[in-house]
Image (cartoon, rainbow, N blue to C red):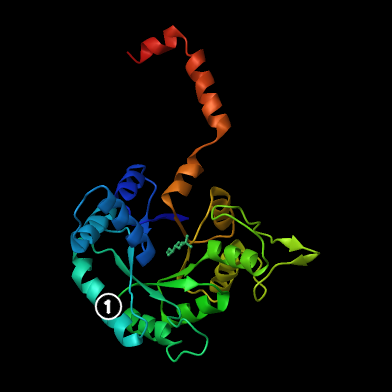
Amino acid sequence: MKIFIDTANIDEIKEAFSWGIVDGITTNPSLIKKAIEYYKEKGNDISMEDYIKELLTTAGEGHPVSLEVIGDTEEEMYREGKLLFDKFNGVSKNVVIKIPVNPETSENGTHQFDGLKTIKKLSSEGIPVNCTLIMSPVQALLAAKAGARYVSPFAGRIDDYLRSQNNIPFKKGDYYPADGFIINENILQDHGIISGVHLVKSIVDIFKNYHFKTEVLAASIRNATQVREIAEVGADIATIPFHVLKEMIYHYKTSEGMKKFENDTVEEYREIFK
Ligand code: E4P
């Protein structure tokens, strides 16, 4: 499984890349807002263009960086996708354009299919697309049919949705069981999907059935346990927040074992390293 870092914070990105385990970056307008606020608070003046270029060079060629459009019509999203690609792909040849599967904010809007149309157009021009805000397996199927290089199912937000629809209080990082949450003998579900991990698994299974080349990029990940479960169901990629990457490395028994090895090291053995 490839690991992407889910942040636009350049300090976090640089540190995570220095660990040698990061294969790419995903950003979205909310992550860029957070990063810009962080730098402004530190008193830094930021040119957005230079900032994006730094993200791209830090990742380097072969490490995809998703940049999201902000429009909600086919015309706007296509123009913005082309603009982002033409302006920035020359830097490190790693730009991926993020397009929402459905840019409409209501059920009856007239632009429900503009995401798919944009994916089709950009993909047929050779521009790689990461289709975002995937909340159901059938949305992922449509995005793959339209030619998306990646689909991003939002595992954590599905877990949030299942809990909030059923008035279950939770905090953002809280674990949600991959095999579902039972209340009064009923399993919580959304059109048969019982957890964010189940959403990812369903998409992995569908793509396998039909040999789609589209990669499943599990997103909206909330904790290290969810990373394990996403890896178990065979996601191609997980995009992981910096704090969750840090959570993944620690285990109490590893630290305890390390202390014991340090205490047990005899002088004769230490001499070898001098
Ligand atoms: C990444 O591609 C997504 O935009 C991101 O994972 C969303 O995460 P969130 O649900 O924690 O905002």
Please state if 65 lies on the left or on the right of 132 as rendered.
Answer: left
Quadrant hosting residue 257: top right
Residue at figure coordinates x 56%, y 32% from the top left: 252
Count of numbered circles on the image: 1
Residue at figure coordinates x 20%, y 57% from the top left: 46
Outermost top residue: 268
Ligand 1 rendered quadrant: bottom left
Q: Is residue 94 above or below residue 119?
A: above
Residue at figure coordinates x 20%, y 73% from the top left: 86
Quadrant hosting residue 184: bottom right
Q: Nearer the viewer, residue 230 or 73?
A: 73
Quadrant hosting residue 52: bottom left
Q: Position of residue 165 (x, y in %)?
A: 64, 70
Which quadrant of the figure contains the C terminus?
top left
Residue 213 in view (yes/no) = no
Please state if 232 lies on the left or on the right of 41 as rendered.
Answer: right
Residue placed under numbered mark 1 in the picture: 80
Residue 84 in view (yes/no) = yes
Q: Is residue 139 above or below residue 14?
A: below
Please state if 263 lies on the left or on the right of 65 as rendered.
Answer: right
